[in-house]
Image (spheres, rainbow, N blue to C red):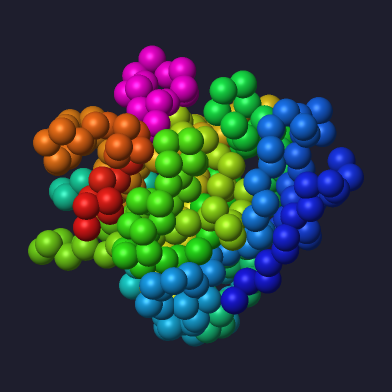
Amino acid sequence: MALTGAWDVSCSDDQDLSNGLENVVVVIDSSDVGKGAFPNFQYTPENVPGPGCSSDPSEITLPGCQCHLQSCQSEQCQCLQRYGPAYDGQHRLLERRDKESHYSRPVFECNALCDCSEDCSNRVVQKGVSLRLLVFHTKDRGWGVRTMEAIPRGSFVCEYAGEVIGLEEARLRQLSQGPEDMNYIIAVREYAGEGKVRETFVDPFARGNVGRFINHSCQPNLFMVPVRVHSMVPRLSLFSVQDIDPDEELTFDYSGTYNNNHTTKILSSEQSLVSEQRDPGESIDSLQRKPCYCGALNCTGYLPLDITVLHS
């Protein structure tokens, strides 16, 4: 299980938000402290088990390779032969979309049972945050995250880490929220063919990482990919859609539809879905729909919301 650290809002300007649990300092813009209440939460760089979680995210259950190499090669690595290469030589995500099915192949990294070195090119997400990130207060969307350095396309930025919870717990938590409450729960559905669906629910409200501060955009510069390392519980990993400039705000599409003809669907949230499935007389407000202020030309007007969780 990952170590966690509580963050003290009264800390000095230079204190690390992660309390040393990340590879680099995650800072808060000191000029924004006091502009809005900063959430009280426990920092964890990786997923932790919560109520209803059937598998411990830190448990090592996947097999390893027997590669005694600095970096695994496809010709002899069982991991790469089994799942295919996910990254190029610069540790950037490769195109994983199947031309026939248009689905993306799953991403599996080498793990703790593998004999390859820690420098293996098939170890990226498990190494954690390596980019300098800044938490700041936005004009109308609460807290957000900027990058302090350039990010090349396909680079891993951070996880969306938190408590892995069950469906019933996700439903109870979402139903307990009022219109003024922020919703952090993400539901990821992976489609494996023949109607097989694997669901993962992650809530970083009480225990989470820097990913909990990344805002939604209908035209984002990050997208989410489920990556498996030690177990079948995926790590919800955010990669750059494009080259990103320093000081640019980082965003991803909470619905999971942008740049992602994927086996994964995050928070089914189309307005038509709300209209079709809501009960007669039930307002959008009662479904906790919140306006979107991303400012994109293609903005849908509302933040994504998975009503299938609410009505389970």
Please report the residue visible at 24 percent of the width from the left and 32 percent of the height from the top.
Answer: 283
Compare residues 279 and 69 and report the one nearer the observer. 279
Can residue 292 be found in the magenta stretch? yes
31 left or right of 127? right
* Residue that protrudes farthest toward the top in the picture: 297
Residue 304, position as x, y percentages in the image = 35, 37
Magenta-span inclusion, residue 296: yes
What residue is rendered at 52% in x and 84% in y? 113
* Foreground residue among 40 and 191: 40
**Placement of the N terminus among the 4 image quadrants:** bottom right
Q: Is residue 132 left or right of residue 235?
A: right
Lateral position of residue 195 relative to residue 172, left or right:
left
Q: Main secondary structure of the magenta part?
A: loop
- Which x, y percent locates residue 235? 47, 61
Frontmost residue, 191 versus 141: 141
Q: Position of residue 242 (x, y in %)?
A: 49, 32
User: Is 89 situated left or right of 131 in this image?
Assistant: left
Magenta residues, start to end = 290-304
